[in-house]
Image (cartoon, helix red, strand yellow):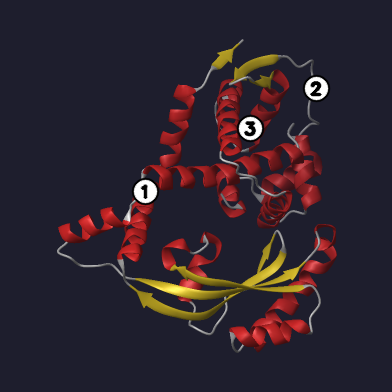
Amino acid sequence: MTARKLARQFALCSALAAFVIAGGLSAAPAQAASEIKVIVNKQAITSYQIQQRAAFLKLRRAPGGTQAATDELIDEALKTQEMRRRGIQIPDAAVDEAFARFARDNKLTEAQLSEVLARAGFSAKGFKDYIRVQMGWGQAVVANVRQTERITEQDAVQRMIQQGGKKPTTTEYTLQQVIFVVPQDKRGSQMERRMSEANLLRQRFTSCPATYDIAKGLRDVTVRDLGRIPQPELPPRWKDEIVNAARGKTTKAQQTERGVEFVAICDSRSVSDDQTAAMVFQANEMEAMGKKEPDKAFLKKLRDKAAIIRR
């Protein structure tokens, strides 16, 4: 889940933020003695966690109070456990970038957003933990759908026969990634300059081989050949821009957890074979599953199997 989607979900607008920062909300209540209220597969959820999550729900203008906060924390524990089981780890830099983007989208500095959260009885750390789970859970859901709805080349051939033998085609892109590295502790002071440098290189871009020669004269710039990637497997973050860009052009530069990046489209071609057919059918299945909210079904499955003890 991206920071922009989080922003839409939370309805934390700049007007509310200004109201809080101006002193519109009283200070958060002091932490009371904490006790274990729920155990989810041997993972404890405390009364203090529930208190904080209830405050977060209130800030998001979500109904339910303590009960809703408890249920959300149970779901979050299940999601975290599934992420751990699948080896999904979200880097701190990616979480920090999402937090910073969320602040910018709401016309706040990171310090102001932290103050909004603290005054509401939550915390910047708690919000970042929440972001981490949302990002990792999205990966877990996709991995589960790919695993349970996997389409083999044999399946694809059968579908083609059912459709009169018509073999689907897709576009395969040869891509190059250019990264203007920005250290985590220098993001505030260097990001704007590095964005300008990246855009200058984009303007000078003529071909992928030539990028290496240009990058040699630049400091802390990494150029990676990504090879051939079919359209269904393009990274979601870049997919729309790559599809809409012409061969020999680049995407816009974006801030990422590594610094500033853009992707160059070195070449593109139309491909059609059994492997491509399986990939296209798989992508169509994924899109159809997305409309059915597979995350809810997956979470229900985890809940049904879990040992949940309420005290």
Q: Quadrant of residue 132?
A: top right
* Res. 10 in view: no
Decide which of tag 2 and tag 3 comes sooner along the chain: 2
Asked if residue 101 lies left or right of residue 299, the reply is: right
Q: Is residue 128 above or below residue 107?
A: above
Decide which of tag 2 and tag 1 comes sooner along the chain: 2
Q: Which residue is mark 1?
A: 150
Type of the residue with mark 2: Gln
Q: Mark 3 near mark 1, Cβ–Cβ under 8 Å?
A: no
Q: Quadrant of the C terminus?
A: top right
Q: Which residue is mark 3?
A: 58
Q: Position of residue 239 (x, y in %)?
A: 50, 66
Q: Is residue 308 above or below residue 159?
A: above
Q: Mark 2 near mark 3, Cβ–Cβ under 8 Å?
A: no
Q: Position of residue 281 (x, y in %)?
A: 32, 57
Q: CA distance from mark 2 to mark 3?
A: 17 Å
Q: For numbered disc 3, what is the local secondary structure?
A: helix
Instruction: Specify the farthest residue to the front.
Output: 154
Q: Nearer the viewer, residue 59 or 114?
A: 114
Q: CA distance from mark 3 to mark 1?
A: 40 Å
Type of the residue with mark 3: Lys
Q: Position of residue 40 (x, y in %)?
A: 59, 21
